[in-house]
Image (cartoon, helix red, strand yellow):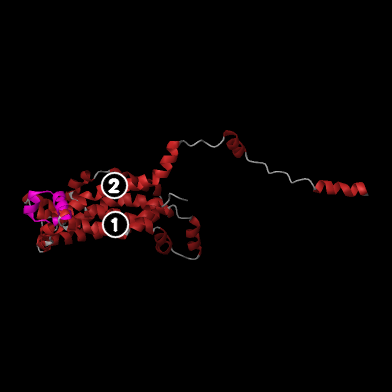
Amino acid sequence: MSATSAQPSADSAQPPPEPIQPAEDLASQAMGAPKRGLAYRIVSRLGGGIVQVLLVLVAMFWLMPTFGLFIASLRPSQESAGSGWWTATWEFITSLSASAAAFSFDNYVSILANDRIVGSLWNTVLISVPATLLVVLISAGAAYAFAWMEFPGRDWLFLIVVGLIVVPIQVGLIPDAQVFRVLGVFGTVTAAILFHVAFGLPFAVFLLRNFFIGIPRDLLEAARMDGGKEFTIFRKVVLPLGWPAIASLAIFQFLWVWNDLLVAQVFTGAESAPITVTLREQMREFGSSLDVIAPGVFLSMIVPLAVFFAFQRYFVQGVLAGSVK
C-alpha cells in the first residue's frame, strides 16, 4: 500500500510538459532578429516629421496656382500688367497699409454684373447637374442588372459596355453632331447633356457593377424570401450599401462635365455656352484683360471645389471600397 500510494505523489510532482513551439518561431530564434543600424534609427525617428514636411510642401506647391489666381483676381488690370502676383503679395505682407488699396473685389462686382458671364455660369449648371444625375441613375440600374439579374447575353453585353470605355471622345464628335442636327438639338444645352451621358455611361456601369457584385448574396436572397421585388431590393438594399461608390461616381462625373471645354465648344451655341467656352472667348477677345479672366476662372473653380469638399467623406469611402475584406 505504501509503494502504491507513493507512486502518484511522485508523478504529481513532475512539471507539466512544455508546449511545442511552431517551426517558424524556432527558425526566427535560430536566425535572430535583424540588426538595426544607426541610419535606420535616425530615419525611424525623423521619418514622421520628414513626411509631414514633405506633405506640407507638396500641398503648398499644389495650391500655389490657385492662390496666385485669387491674388490676380483682386488686382486692377494696370497693376497686373505692371507686376506679378508674387510681387504684390510680398508688398502686401511687408507693408500692409501701403498695399491694402491695391486689392479689392471690384473685379468680381464687374463679373457678376456681366450678363454673359452670369448666363454662362447658369448654362454650366444646366449641363452639369442633369448629365450627372442621368449617368448616376441609369448606370446604377444597369449595374444592378449586370451584377444580380440573369438574362440571355448578359456577359457579352457587359463586355461590349466595357469595350466602349476605350472609345475616344473625338471619335464621336462628328457623328453625334450630325445626329443632333437632324434631331434639331444641335447648339443647345440638350446636345451637350446627351453627349456627356452617352460617353459617361460605360465607365459608370463598369464601376458600379464591380462594386455591387461585392455585396453579399445572402442579403439579396433574404430580401427575396421576404417577398421583395427586384426594384424594392435595388432601392432599399443595394443603393444604401452602394452609396459610397455612387457618390464617388457623381463627383467624378460632375467635375468632368463642369470643367469640359471640347464637348461644349462643339455642341453648344452662343446662347447655351458654359463658362469654359465664355472664358475662352474672353481670352481670345481680351487677351490682356486679366481683371476679367482671373475672377471668372476663380468663380468657375468655386463650385467644383465646394462639391468635392462637401462629398469628400463619401469619395474616400468609395475609393477605398473593396480594398479591405
Bin the neighbour count of mark 1 within 10 Å (Cα to Cα): few under 14, some 14-19, many 20 and up.
Answer: some
Specify whether residue 148 is painted magenta: no
Query: Which contiguous range is marked in magenta?
Result: 73-93
Which of these two is toward me, 199 or 79? Answer: 79
Q: Which residue is depicted at the point 50% across and 57% down?
A: 218
- Residue type at tag 2: Leu
- Magenta region, main secondary structure: helix
Of residues 49 and 300, which is closer to you in this image? 49
Indicate which disc, 2 or 1, sits on the residue closer to the N terminus. Answer: 2
- Residue 148 lies left or right of residue 116; in this view the side is right
The residue under label 2 is 57
x%, y% of residue 78? 6, 53
The residue located at (26%, 52%) in the rendering is 198
Relative placement, left or right, of 217 versus 134 is right
Q: Judge by depth and name the residue closer to the eye, 249 or 89.
A: 89
Please name the amino acid that badge 1 sits on. Phe
Mark nearer the viewer, 2 or 1: 2
Q: Is residue 111 visible?
A: yes
Q: Image height check: is 129 above or below 30?
A: below
**Extreme residue toward the bottom, this view:** 227
The image position of residue 98, as x and y in percent, is: 11, 58
Q: CA distance from mark 2 to mark 1?
A: 22 Å
Q: State the image coordinates of residue 266 (x, y, percent, origin top left).
A: 15, 50
As helix, strand or loop, the secondary structure at mark 1 comes to helix
| Residue 143 quadrant | bottom left
- Label 1: which residue? 308
